[in-house]
Image (tube, helix red, strand yellow):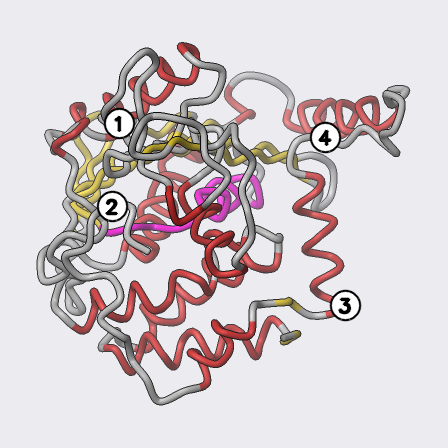
Amino acid sequence: MIVTKQQLHELIKNKLHHAGLNNDHADTVADVLVHADAKGIHSHGAVRVEYYAERISKGGTNTHPNFTYTETGPCSAIFDGDNGAGHVAAKQAMEKAIIMAKEKGVAIVGVRRIGHSGALSYFVEQASQTGMIGISLCQSDPMVVPFGGSEVYYGTNPIAFSAPGIGDKHITFDMATTVQAWGKVLDARSRHADIPNTWAVDDKGQPTTDPFAVKGLLPIAGPKGYGLMMMVDVLSGILLGLPFGKHVSSMYHDLTQGRELGQLHIVINPAFFTDTTLFKEHISQVMTELNQIKPAEGVEKVLYPGENSQIEAQRSEKEGIEIVDEIYDYLTSDVLFNQSFDNKNPFAS
């Protein structure tokens, strides 16, 4: 099914509002999800709405959170999300970080006690759209087999980065520290498609191509990805006094309770380190030079990080966004949720 960005935004917003979010919060969550779908990151788009609706309806997302922001040092602060919608808390925390970085040069804002916040690229691009460098790290529930292990311990623990170039150009990457994010497996399930055998393992620890057989994800580059996911967990969990590692709450266990997740935003103002015009020119130069590199045989063009998503976003603006029929049918139905997620194991179907 092909829909416009505005149509998809309204469908998502209406469903979340019906579940219990106020209009402003539902609007923000819809913004983040449509941002993902428009860029082709369907694992973090409309596929998540039914889960959010079920958690909201059952009280696991605080629909009237008391957000608090406390500066703890010259360049540091804590934003407490009171277990409200993670997308809303993370967006507001990044807005605070940008203001601080404009004045102080650097800002580090810990976001405590939030729910799932979606694609981190949304938040780092908040920073790059204002001429800043944005970095965001977020912990998640244990779904990854550590290097050399046979049981899950860490989450997919994503990292995102964005820096501005000339005009509205920016260079962005948003990656899980696993070979693929769990949402990619969910997307494959929604399409009834196989996954590569390098993404995950089954209940015997063996590689699987069946998205419904997944019992553990794999870290990128073996021990290197394992180390990165540890770093993310320390900076967005232990550093903020929150549950960590295997103690992070499951996305699906008891949807009546808040997730207590953590996220860390870092914003850097280039003006405190170099000439801002020169900085943006050099970022744009990097993009151009990467594009001009002779491609390998069978490759049409070398893309800079995030360019693929930007191309997809431009295409979506003109041609609309394709979402699977089952998700469209859910969004346009009167059904709020189908008891699909509560008290399931982390790899629930």
Q: Earlier in the sequence, mark 3 or mark 1?
A: 1
- Residue picked out by circle 2: 346
- Residue picked out by circle 1: 154
Q: Earlier in the sequence, mark 2 or mark 3?
A: 3
User: Are circles 4 and 2 on residues that touch, CB within 8 Å?
Assistant: no
The secondary structure type at the circle numbered 3 is helix
- Residue picked out by circle 3: 318
Residue type, numbered disc 4: Tyr
Q: Earlier in the sequence, mark 4 or mark 2?
A: 4
Tell me: 181 left or right of 111: right
Coordinates of residue 94 in the picture (x, y in percent):
37, 44
At 46% across and 79% down in the image, what residue appears? 11
Q: CA distance from mark 4 to mark 2?
A: 34 Å
Quarter occupied by residue 324: bottom right
| Name of the residue lying farthest toward the bottom | 334
Front disc: 4 or 2: 2
> Would you place residue 265 above or below residue 318 in this image?
above
At 29% across and 80% down in the image, what residue appears? 336
Front disc: 3 or 1: 1
The secondary structure type at the circle numbered 4 is loop
The secondary structure type at the circle numbered 1 is loop
Q: Earlier in the sequence, mark 4 or mark 1?
A: 1
- Circle 1 packing at 10 Å, graded few (<14), some (14-19), many (20+), is many
Q: Earlier in the sequence, mark 3 or mark 4?
A: 4
The span picked out in magenta is 115-129
Q: CA distance from mark 2 to mark 3?
A: 37 Å
> Would you place residue 325 above or below residue 38 in this image?
below
- Circle 3 packing at 10 Å, graded few (<14), some (14-19), many (20+), is few
Coordinates of residue 69 in the picture (x, y in percent):
19, 45
Magenta-colored stretch includes residue 348: no
- Residue picked out by circle 4: 304
The foreground one among 125 and 230 is: 230
